[in-house]
């Protein structure tokens, strides 16, 4: 049988309207012991994800654990992107065991879920494996997660991937939402987020646009 290729995206790619994002426990106390990723890079990656999701209007759940009594506030880079949105504070280490979070998951009604947060081995493994068990399609943004050691993060990622979770990165997430530079309505937003939080890639955009007015897709 001859295959007939068509210029259409695969169903496994994420788009702004086909998923919900869940950002878990990006808090000061959790970040102090995070060693698998540099704190500055972690904040940049989390900010990139949050701003991309907000810009593309992805339904997003922001959840914390013991915010007032122990773990501290969520990173301002995230809450600023979702100005005025309530944070769902929990006592459970596994976000999926919190009734308020699950009520919001059900209200949003997306079968595909994308997760990121601290720590990978606890705050992310718990809800991803729980969501998989209940029939959801699950992605994890690996470089917007961190843990107490490289080993802890890597084994947590291994465990999730072996169970069926699909890994991706922060920049990949945003560019997958944009996907085509000819989508002019979100072009400036996407490149603007990259310039602020996209590391060396963002510096390259700044250079190209400043020095010779370059732009993708034109």
Image (spheres, helix red, strand yellow):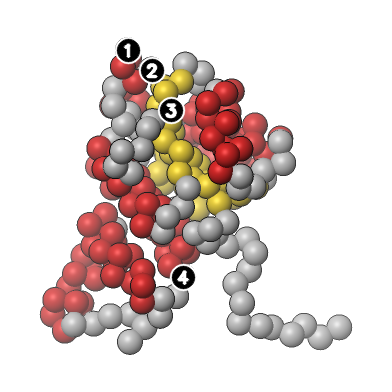
Q: Which residue is mark 3?
A: 88
Label 1: element kind: helix
Give the image location of residue 36, x and y in percent: 38, 36
User: What residue is at 21 percent from the left and 65 percent from the top?
Assistant: 203
Label 3: element kind: strand
Q: Disc 2 vs disc 1: Cβ atoms closer than 8 Å?
A: yes
User: What residue is at 81 percent from the left and 86 percent from the top?
Assistant: 2
Q: Is residue 20 left or right of residue 86?
A: right
Quadrant of the drawing holding the N terminus:
bottom right
Give the image location of residue 39, x and y in percent: 27, 38
- Label 2 and label 4: CA atoms lie apart by 37 Å
User: What residue is at 41 percent from the left and 59 percent from the top?
Assistant: 56
- Label 1 and label 4: CA atoms lie apart by 42 Å
Q: Which residue is mark 2?
A: 66
Q: Is residue 135 left or right of residue 27?
A: right
Outermost residue, right side: 1
Q: Which mark is residue 69?
A: 1
Regarding residue 25, the answer to whether it shows in the image is no
Camera-near label (4 vs 3) is 3
Q: Disc 3 vs disc 2: Cβ atoms closer than 8 Å?
A: no
């Amino acid at each position: 049988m001859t295959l007939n290729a068509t210029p259409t995206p695969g169903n496994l790619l994420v788009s702004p309207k086909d998923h919900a994002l869940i950002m878990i426990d990006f808090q000061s106390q959790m970040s102090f012991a995070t060693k698998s990723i540099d704190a500055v890079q972690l904040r940049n990656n989390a900010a990139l994800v949050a701003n991309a999701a907000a810009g593309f209007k992805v339904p997003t759940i922001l959840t914390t654990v013991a915010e007032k009594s122990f773990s501290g506030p969520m990173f301002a880079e995230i809450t600023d992107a979702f100005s005025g949105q309530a944070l769902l504070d929990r006592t459970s280490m596994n976000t999926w065991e919190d009734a308020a979070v699950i009520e919001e998951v059900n209200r949003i009604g997306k079968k595909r879920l994308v997760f990121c947060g601290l720590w990978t081995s606890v705050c992310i493994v718990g809800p991803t494996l729980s969501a998989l068990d209940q029939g959801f399609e699950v992605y994890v943004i690996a470089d917007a997660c961190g843990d107490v050691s490289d080993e802890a993060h890597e084994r947590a990622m291994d465990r999730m991937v072996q169970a069926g979770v699909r890994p991706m990165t922060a920049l990949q997430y945003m560019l997958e939402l944009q996907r085509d530079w000819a989508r002019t309505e979100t072009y400036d937003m996407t490149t603007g987020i990259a310039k602020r939080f996209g590391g060396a890639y963002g510096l390259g955009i700044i250079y190209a646009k400043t020095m010779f007015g370059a732009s993708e897709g034109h």
